[in-house]
Amino acid sequence: MSDLRSGLPVYSPSAPASGDETLDFRALARRRDDERGGQPWRSLEELAKSPEFEAMLHRDENAAVFESPSGETAGVDRRELFQYLGVSFALAGLTACTRQPAEKIVPYVRQPEEIVPGGKPLFYATAMTLAGSATGLLIESHEGRPTKAEGNPLHPASLGASDPFAQASLYGLYDPDRSQTLLYLEEIRPWASFLGAIRAALDGERASGGAGLRILTETVASPTLARQIGEILRAFPGARWIQWEPAGRDNARAGAKLAFGEPVEPIYRFEDADVILSLDADFLSFGAGHLRSTRGFSSRRRVGKDGAGLNRLYAIESSPGNTGAKADHRLAMRAADVESFARAVAAAVDGAATSSVPPGVSPAFLSALAADLHAHRGRSLVLAGDHQPPAVHAIAHAVNAALGNAGRTVTYVEPAEPAVSDQMGDLRTLVSDMDGGRVRTLIILGGNPVFTAPADFQFGDRLQKVPLRVHLAPSFDETSVACQWHIPEAHFLEAWSDARAFDGTATIVQPLILPLWGGRSAHEVVAAMSDQPEKSAYDIVRDTWRPRLGPDFEAAWRRALHDGVIPKTASAEKSVRAKAVVPATGSASTASTPAPGPAGLEILFRPDPMIHDGRFANNGWLQELPKPLTKLTWDNAAIVSPATAARLGLAKEDVVRLAVGARSVAAPIWIEPGHPDDSVTVHFGYGRTRAGRFGTGAGFNAYAIRSSDALWIANGSLTKTGGKHPLACTQMHQNMEGRDIVRAANAADFRKDPEFAHRQTEAPKNGESMYAPYPSDTYAWAMAIDLNQCVGCNACVIACQSENNIPVVGKDQVRRGREMHWIRLDHYYGGNPALPQHFFQPVPCMHCENAPCELVCPVGATVHSAEGLNDMVYNRCVGTRYCSNNCPYKVRRFNFYHYSTQFRAPSMRMLANPDVTVRWRGVMEKCTYCVQRINGAKIDSELAGRRVKDGEITTACAQACPADAIVFGDLADKESRVSKLREDPRSYGLLEEIGTRPRTTYLAQVRNPNPAIDEPVRRDWPRVYGEETDQQ
Amino acid sequence: MSAREPQPPRAGQETPGGGHVPVIQPGYTFGSVTDKIGQIVLSRKTPMFWWFGFGISFLIMMVLLGAVGYLFFQGVGIWGVNVPVGWGFAIVNFVWWIGIGHAGTLISAILLLLRQEWRTSINRFAEAMTLFAVACAGLFPLLHLGRPWLAYWLMPYPNTMGLWPQWRSPLVWDVFAVSTYASVSALFWYVGLIPDFATLRDRARNKGFQIVYGMLSLGWRGSAQHWHRYETAYLLLAGLATPLVISVHTVVSFDFTVGIIPGWHSTIFPPYFVAGAIYAGFAMVLTLSIPLRKLYGLEDFITLRHLQNMGKIMLATGLIVGYGYMIEAFMGWYSGVPAEGYMTTSRMLGPYAPSYWALIFCNIVTPQTLWFRKVRTTPWILFLVAMVVNVGMWLERFVIVVTSLHRDYLPSSWGMYHGTIWDWATFIGTIGLFLSLLFLFIRFLPMISIFEMRTLVPEADMKDEA
Amino acid sequence: MTQFEHDPGEGGHLYGLMAEFESPAELLGASRRAYEEGYRKMDAYSPYPIHELTEALGIRPTKLPWLVLAGGIVGCGAALLMMWFSATIHYPINVGGRPLASWPMFIPITFEVTVLFASVTAVFGMLGMNGLPMPYHPVFNAPRFALASRDRFFLCIEAQDPHFDLDRTSRLLATLGARIVSEVED
């Protein structure tokens, strides 16, 4: 029964309705540790079998959930599940008899309207920190098992939305490859022996005032951790604290310094901006507050009756991203040229004669752009990408100032992170100190510097010169193996902490579960270095906030835990003046701007859109989540433009050797239309050597050629090796083939003919059919997806995966076309392969009223419900796959193998949503409109004796969507949002001309190009027969 | 008795050019016909080539067992199927085998009704071939299920859940069509065998054979009463089997036409599927009968006349099939439906173009040689043509199933399909199964209907007596 | 010259007289004559069906076709009823928005079941009417009767026939050109 070690729900499912529950972590932990000796949990198992508990078990509705169709057990068998529950009950009970100070956590009892739990879970507010800023989350907890992450509507960085990283954090929590024990030289040691070691080391340091002590962290967003480290630094004046984030924001900070003299954080108000110019900034996909940016941006893509109020986006991109894909005007430009373009814009805005215009940019375009910006003074916005040199940021600030946007569409605040630092500079010093033997003790709190540090630092080798090396990390990774001490890091859902959002708003990070494997948080490790080594993170965090939360601390604390935000913590607006003049070249960290020679290639380093800097490399959900445009999974690639590929004679999957200076790495080629020529994009984060079952060996390590002097943009070369590396792409064909799949028009044409979407097809008018409609006096569920608002961020895909227990199938199966995502995000190109237009389209099940799939099922395993759902009856399915063949949308997914076995991993089985059946081999599955949520809401409404109100039910995809593009509701209710949207002239059904009468409908896209620049909608694309995969 | 001493038949003599060759070479009597066919079964020693052929076939059949075992252990994931191509080799092979299974019943039923006496010497093993082909075909719909152990859910049976099959699904139609076809063919075959069993019972010297054949003959004694009812029943069966044989492949074609996938949703399918089935069936009959008549020296019974006629039928049905392809392509363009149009073009130019053009070569070009009598009357050339057509018909089903699915309505979901080693193992394996059954058949049952052959013997002609 | 065979079957009970002929024509002629002589309880045995015998022996046309028709009708009704009942009454459910009783889609199965029932009736009806299987029958006792399934033709006049008289009947058969006339024990 060793799998019982795999964690332990802390809160009982019968948490009091008040939602307030008293728990004692330390007591639980101690009891667990006592009983763990030898035979872990045996006594608790016996407890679990006590009669009154059995009695309670049989009242549990979720019992059936873990039984797969046809009765075979999938993952967890009922008995074991109940034993877990027993353990949790027992421990919840045990908490009574203790004298330890209680740690109170507060469930989210008053859920906002749009949140409807599936069964009877509790929601807890917390926050996830990534790259130095926090996103507020509500975590759904079933019987003490966190199972689903949602955005916290009250949190400024979320507004109820969530991104793939947040959704996938649950997978990270239960990842069986997390390190489970504290190690010294890879031998298991108790916490106490680490305490001994560290205190001895510190005593040694005291004499020198800690001259040999270094603390290396990622960008810290936690005030408490900053406070703790500050105290350490006070105790050891000679010690140094270094922050290193491989995808850091040094350039942005330096740019702000350049413009304002201080590193202020710009807060963009996209909802107020009519015209937006993005200088290589992918603000829709990643970065501080990107969810909020998306929400603001897409709120201005909502098309009114006459298309008024649409914003206009100009995107300059060095590597295709979602932002460029949504742009009304997009320029592909080598990253090195962006600065000169920015200067040209600045000059044009100032009315001066346009200076040097980078190649491929027509002066007409430039002047039109400048005119447009001018015309919208105070309602325009210019922003630069984090990887662009400081100068570009400074110019952006200057232009915003010149256009009077400052204070209107952009405001400036103190950066959220407690300690802003020149990370590259600090790291360089640290490395030279290590090299010079001046570092005696290095405490690495999180991060994986051996893997992520610039190659020229040879961090790994130099690390060996440090006598005492401690690494706190979630898994035993590349850095852990280079250190003596490895401390398993507690997941953010396992430990107390706090974190600030991009605008400074603070959140108390409250745990939802006891550390599965006794992990420690950074707070505890730093505390171990302080004079209160045993102080719990809970107390430490409270100490931080006690002085700040006013007189009635306990009430304020409870409020803060409950809401997930601490009121009045957002940083105050600063009034700063940007220097209009910008020095010609950027600062030290941008020695990369000189444009490469004709022979040379520009190599761009970007964090991977899905596994970020590599920390998520072992996260199956993120690995299998198709990258927004390339639709690649499980790999990174060297991405080049079709023209460059043709020039160098490259084909997809060709293995090439990318070289920067003396360093080189072998990488497979991927060809992406719209990529600037003579430029290669590589995503770092792949090529891990110690990540776990999924991450290890996937992709190539771009860090190997990333050096400190060319962190983002490098000049390199590319040579064919003749080898091939298979890549797993989920959408081989991104050509609409001239069919009316995504319907789009320019705003002008839309005003002329609002019904344009229907001109393009011969669909039966108002969905008339040969067959008499089935009488329905009940709900009629339907979904409307606004293609104008969707930004293709993939949040819906992974939210669905998390909600519906969708398995990960692996690279080989994806290559065979067997990915299981219930909603997929289609992406099409249009127009000119050199500079294409992009079209996104999320495709869930259409729940056709005349469903072709139902007609052909020989056993009636898929049939129609009275509410218009296309139900899939798993335990009736025999697996003929006829329904999938006959589905014109191909949204059905089949369990070719027993994919759900992954839920057998002792910890993974806790990840499953108990409200959704885990599917068995040989069974068809597909989008259910989150029927478990629908039924949950119906039960509630029936108890209350009323109909379900509009907005009461939200599908997982709609709830996660930051763009608010997906609306779910009841067609029978004429006032519902979805009913209204179906009345919209843009509303159309996908393939409605074949008479399927889909319940999921789309709102056609309306682009808003500058009339001065002629850019018609182009949905055509050069057709290529023959090739198996042809994106050109 | 002495008057009609059967003179030894002059085997292997064939009229060159095969003009008006009789359906049975002259000089045969009731007795000699009976003995010549009977001894193949009754003779004690089994020919070497039989052991050889059966051994090979049996080994291949073992491959099938292995493949199926692994399939049940792992799941259909071991095959190349995916989304969008949910049906692969399994359904291709199913349709191929069913098609082959059509010649037997056709020959015995339709040609019987048309009073084509030349059918007599080939109907028996054509029917056997039908049964074995249907047996192979029947395997695939079961194997291709995600959960094969639940296949019985496709049959209506009383169950506590009160569930029924979904009558609108062509797969349920398949279940009824194929099982009906199998049972009726089996009955037809057995009824035809009863008098011959009686003959074998009376000829067998070995006690065991006497008992076994005795049981199988049900005590047949050739009474005029019985013959009368027997012939009525046989005619009725033929009359019933004729529409049946047409319906079966029509229903199989419904699997596709009821679907809305471009390349499937087409009204031309039923007729050209049936034609294709007859086409494939005769190709297989030729493939089998040409070696058999040689090995067992049956050239006197299966004469060039038979080969010729079968060649002609292949030519005719082949042309019908060609017309089918033509109309499909035409409709792809004429319908004006983008998806249809694209599918047609992509069939010809897309990634699967090679299989399409190979299919055209095998099924349309090659059979044109059958216009020449030389080809129709030269067994080995005819054999080659038949072989090519067998391959062509398999390709036809592959093209219909795979190319239609792999690029349908939404380009985003387009994909590729490749058969895996297990797909091939299963396919080849069923060929082993088929041949093994066939070898057992020719060893233990008269491969030519003895009693019907007697009616062809000159003696049977009343006039010369009267 | 006809050769008479009568085994001294003491106590054995006579079934009839079996005459062996060499050609179908002889058998046919013999049958006709015997019928004219008023014999009714008799049967002919041949290695293959000889249609002329039917009227020669005065065999009434069989009722089998009507039986088969009935079988077909039953099958057709049963299939339609089953599908209609299950789809509309016992298990009514919305499938693809199609009507519950979507009769056009019931046709294929109806047809198949009709054919199945009819065919089964035809085969087993024939066997039943012929009283098969019947492992033992007196005629098998006749010497050389095994040849009835090869190349000899037999006519058997049964003892039950009112006109039957051992001597007269055997003489008659002899005159009809029978090669061998033998008594068949029951």
Image: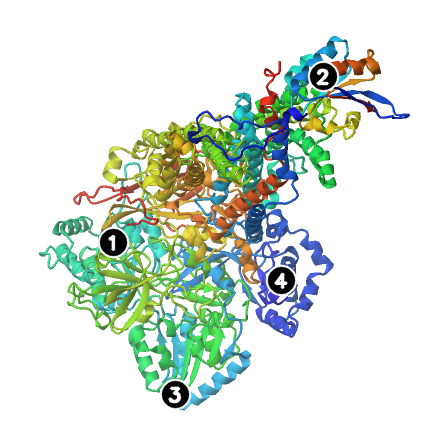
Residue type indicated by callout 4:
Ser
Q: Pointer 2: what residue? A: C177
Of A464 and C157, the residue lying toward us: C157
Amino acid at the residue labelled 1:
Pro
Q: Earlier in the sequence, mark 4 or mark 3?
A: 4
Element type where label 1 sits in the image: helix
User: Which residue is nearer to you in this view: A170 or B363?
Assistant: B363
Residue A18 or C67: which is nearer the viewer?
C67
Figure check: C35 above or below A204: above
Residue matched to label 1? A642
* Callout in the foreground (2, 4): 2
Q: Amino acid at mark 2?
A: Gly
| Dot in front, 1 or 3 | 1
Neighbourhood count class around disc 3 (C-alpha, 10 Å): few under 14, some 14–19, many 20 upward? some
Amino acid marked by disc 3 = Gly
Q: Secondary structure at mark 2?
A: loop
Q: Is there CB contact under 8 Å for labels 2 and 4? A: no
Q: Which circle, 4 or 3, is nearer the viewer?
A: 4
Dot label at residue A833: none
Residue A5, x across and y down, in percent: 60, 67
**Distance of label 1 from label 2 (alpha carbons):** 99 Å
Q: Which quarter shows the N terminus of chain C? A: top right
Subunit under mark 3: A
Q: Which residue is mark 4?
A: A88
Which circle's residue, 1 or 3, is located before the other in the chain? 3
Q: Nearer the viewer, residue C86 or C68?
A: C68
The alpha-carbon separation of the residues under discs 4 and 1 comes to 57 Å
Q: Is residue A869 visible?
A: no
Q: Which mark is residue A209?
A: 3
- Looking at the picture, do discs 1 and 2 lie on one chain? no
Indicate the chain on which mark 2 is placed: C
Residue A605: horizontal and vertical position, in percent? 29, 65
